[in-house]
Image: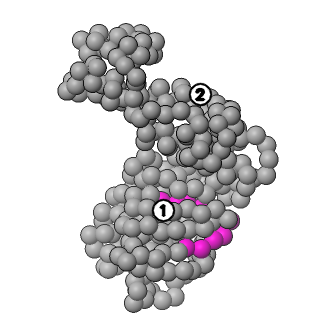
């Protein structure tokens, strides 16, 4: 089912309590409690939506989305001079359970939904993501283009869309589950909070690797001590923040070298290295050859 909500009301006033549903919204202001009917995706098309889910605040900007399951509780707030546009997708938790079980037991013709202990329990990590960085996000970007082009018509969506969403959700979370479990044992809410901070730290490195960075700056950005951040980052991601920073710089350097539009010294500076010698040494240690030979 598809519906929309604007300042003037909804296209369907009495929405069903269960079943798959997509709702497009165009609002300048709203303060409302949320009911999570199943798995829920809150995607921002334009502007910013603020959610408080299970006590954690999320500011979801254009091109980002928030994920939560039916154990979530919270509210949404929008206050803007310009209309904020978003897409909310609710789909059956059983679809995710079946997808998770199929990934766990590909040899089983009938999925065993009891295998799914993460997606259908309070253990699920409610969090926000950049659509451009995930498998489910790629599908959301396509959906955004379709709906934004004609939001006030009765779109018809088949079950295939929701099956694809469930499958991509599980694919995106497969590497996240062991990482979350690697956070030292404590209350579930604390584990989730620490893990979200670590993800933010990783994202901060990914977005600022070309600038001078140190552990203290990153830790301060996510509200952790540098020693706590350094230790947990290594424990969860199996590499230190320094190693991840170097990885991002070198990956970008390789991309620039392949383009062939810049000199090695320019690439060294563009990727955040102090000088060409530091860049060449790090490059050779990682790839076994110098940048100049890599170009050849």
Q: Is there CB contact under 8 Å for labels 2 and 1?
A: no
Q: Under tag 2, what secondary structure?
A: loop
User: Which residue occupies 43% across, 89% down?
Assistant: 9
Disc with the residue nearer the chain's start (2 vs 1) = 1
Question: Where is residue 19 drawn, in percent x and y?
Answer: 54, 73
Mark 1 is surrounded, within 10 Å at the Cα level, by few (under 14), some (14 to 19) or many (20 or more) other residues, namely many
Q: From mark 2 to mark 1, how far is it between C-alphas? A: 29 Å
Camera-nearest residue between 264 and 255: 264
Describe residue 45's horizontal placement relative to residue 17 as left or right: left
The answer to whether one can see residue 1 in this image is: no
Residue under pointer 2: 239
168 inside magenta stretch: no
Q: Under tag 1, what secondary structure?
A: strand
Question: Where is residue 278 drawn, in percent x and y?
Answer: 41, 16
Describe residue 31's horizontal placement relative to residue 207 as left or right: right
Please report the bounds of the magenta region as a residue range: 65-76
Camera-nearest residue between 107 and 177: 177
Placement of 275 over or under 229, stated as above or below: above
Placement of 133 over or under 241, stated as above or below: below
Quadrant hosting residue 260: top left
Farthest residue in the right direction? 186
Residue under pointer 1: 60
Describe residue 93's horizontal placement relative to residue 272 as left or right: right
User: Which residue occupies 43% across, 46% down?
Assistant: 133
């Amino acid at each position: 089912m598809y519906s929309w909500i604007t300042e003037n009301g909804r296209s369907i006033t009495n929405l069903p309590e269960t079943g798959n549903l997509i709702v497009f919204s165009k609002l300048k202001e709203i303060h409302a409690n949320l009911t999570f009917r199943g798995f829920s995706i809150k995607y921002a098309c334009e502007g910013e939506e603020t959610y408080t889910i299970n006590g954690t605040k999320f500011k979801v900007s254009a091109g980002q989305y928030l994920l939560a399951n039916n154990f979530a509780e919270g509210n949404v707030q929008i206050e803007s001079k310009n209309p904020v546009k978003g897409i909310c997708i609710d789909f059956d938790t059983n679809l995710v359970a079946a997808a998770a079980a199929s990934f766990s037991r590909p040899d089983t013709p009938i999925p065993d939904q009891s295998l799914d202990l993460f997606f259908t329990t309070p253990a699920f990590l409610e969090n926000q993501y950049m659509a451009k960085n995930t498998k489910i996000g790629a599908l959301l970007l396509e959906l955004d283009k379709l709906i934004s082009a004609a939001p006030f018509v009765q779109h018809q969506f088949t079950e295939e869309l929701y099956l694809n969403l469930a499958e991509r959700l599980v694919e995106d979370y497969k590497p996240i589950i062991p990482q979350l479990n690697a956070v030292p044992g404590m209350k579930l809410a604390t584990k989730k909070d620490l893990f979200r901070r670590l993800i933010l730290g990783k994202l901060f490195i990914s977005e600022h690797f070309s600038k001078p960075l140190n552990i203290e700056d990153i830790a301060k950005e996510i509200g952790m001590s540098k020693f706590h951040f350094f230790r947990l980052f290594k424990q969860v991601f199996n590499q230190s923040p320094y190693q991840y920073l170097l990885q991002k710089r070198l990956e970008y350097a390789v991309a620039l070298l392949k383009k062939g539009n810049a000199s090695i010294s320019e690439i060294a500076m563009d990727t955040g290295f102090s000088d060409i010698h530091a860049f060449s040494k790090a490059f050779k240690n990682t790839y076994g050859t110098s940048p100049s030979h890599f170009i050849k």
